[in-house]
Amino acid sequence: MKAIMVMFDSLNRHMLPPYGADWVHAPNFKRLTEKTVTFDRAFVGSMPCMPARRELHTGRYNFLHRSWGPIEPFDDSTPEILKNNGVYTHLVTDHYHYWEEGGCNYHTRYNTFEFERGQEGDHWIGQVKDEPAKPGAIGRNAEPNRWHAQDRINRKFMQNEEDHYQARTFAKGLDFIERNKEEDNWFLHLETFDPHEPYFVPRKYKDLYDWDFDKYHNHDWPRYGKVEEDEKELIEHLRYTNAALTSMCDAYLGKVLDMMDANDMWQDTMLIVNTDHGFLLGEHDHWAKCVMPFWSEVAQTPLFIWDPRVGKAGERRQSLVQTIDLPATLLDYFGVERPADMQGVPLKETTANDTPVREAGLFGLHGGHVNVTDGRYVYMRAPVKEDNTPLFEYTHMPTHMRRTFSVDEMRKITCLAEPFPFTKGCKTMKIEKQPGKWATAYDFGHLLYDINEDPKQENTLNDRDIEERMIRLMVGEMKKNDAPAEQYERLGVRDYL
């Protein structure tokens, strides 16, 4: 048996034809629905990038205990478990956060790994002099700091499509498949950072759309925050730019489908196509993610699975599933026992006949709303105090995205916390959480939506009975996740314990 996971970053469900966006040129995603089962109720868990990938290794939520960070010493890693049970695991990616301190030990869990450089502000090409913005550049494309200048430097070395990081990543992944197609017992994790911003994309994909991309000087890098009045005219432009990059992702997805077709791999090869989360392109009057509630454009994700054991394709599923279910699905597929601490559930029967795997699921960002959904209602619980306290990080690996915790943060270690059930007897550092730029949940308050009747979440519900039921579901799921005691206090739900 073989398995391939094709993973994109920030792939918007609402920008794909299988989920209603017929104006986006993505014929291979349409083709994918004919070859797989399409999930309509797939949700994120821990946000954003590395917390989501930690879930892909461990199969359990982590956002209640810590923020962005590496695999912890007590974590169970699915690629490593497979590796230790005779399944060869290989990672090909251009996701540069794997090579920063906050993601420094994910790739080493695989037998082998390959990394392509150049995404976003990846510190790749060495050039002492900053690269100035192009004449007329606006927004983040025009920002003078070194990170944005590095992006401008990197782009100079990717003028042809074959030099583009996504193209190089898929070429390496396809090469692995070609060289190993006759072998058995392997898992390929083929992952590109696209269509994450910035939307750096070859012109031929822009030419698929009737839009003047030069009108805004090829502005392709939305910021994070509320849409300002003078940015409203940019919304359509950035949606088209995102669509062009999605079309490029579609083209390279098609190469994987072509290879599976040409080698009749559908008989013995699982295919999972997924993402970590979505992205706001002006919906709810916001850009991006993390600085606002996780509305469905971010939290509800595309997911496609072909499982040769069940042979179902061209069908849709309505059961509530989450990122934490994917590692359990892989372990089950290869006949490897799941660790006791894994909360995710194999999706074999859900893929086969829509068998439900959970009543409710949590999702969120450390220090933000704690969100719960039952597949119909979404409830977002905000902190009840403006200073968002009490809140602590529990970790052996005190790193943020690009560097370790600061000396000031490390001075705020309050104690070695007693072990949680999932830390395998290990005490962890308990570190007071610093106020962050993303800690804005209090300003939005508690929010309740019926996504069946109001899929765009334009109208909040005011129904105390439904809210009470969702709070009880949330608390129940928090207890299953061994949430720190102070999280119940932060959210004002101690009375529901």
Image (cartoon, rainbow, N blue to C red):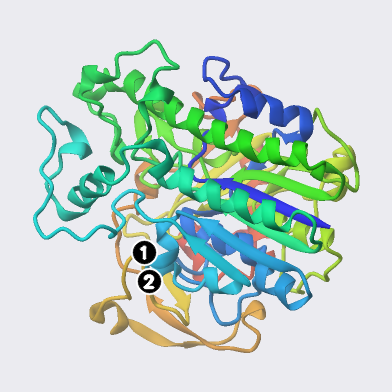
Residue toward you, 274 or 282: 274
Residue toward you, 389 or 151: 151
Number of numbered labels in the structure image: 2
Residue 399, how many percent across, how many down? 38, 73
Residue toward you, 362 or 171: 171
Q: Badge 2: few (under 14), some or many (20 or more) residues near its Cα, within 10 Å?
A: some
Q: Which mark is residue 401?
A: 1
Q: Residue furthest top?
A: 210
| Circle 1: element type | loop
| Circle 2: element type | helix
Q: Are marks 1 and 2 in contact (CB under 8 Å)?
A: yes
Residue 347, how many percent across, how many down? 80, 50
Where is 257 relative to 410, above or below?
Answer: above
Q: To which quarter of the image does residue 31 belong?
A: top right
Residue topped by disc 2:
101
Q: Residue furthest front?
A: 179
Q: Earlier in the sequence, mark 1 or mark 2?
A: 2
Residue beneath the point at 36% across and 70% down: 433
Q: Is 4 on the left-hand or right-hand side of 242?
A: right
Where is 229 relative to 325, above or below?
Answer: above
Q: To which quarter of the image does residue 74 belong?
A: bottom right
Residue type beneath disc 2: Glu
Residue beneath the point at 44% across and 42% down: 293
Residue type beneath disc 1: Met
Q: Badge 1: few (under 14), some or many (20 or more) residues near its Cα, within 10 Å?
A: some
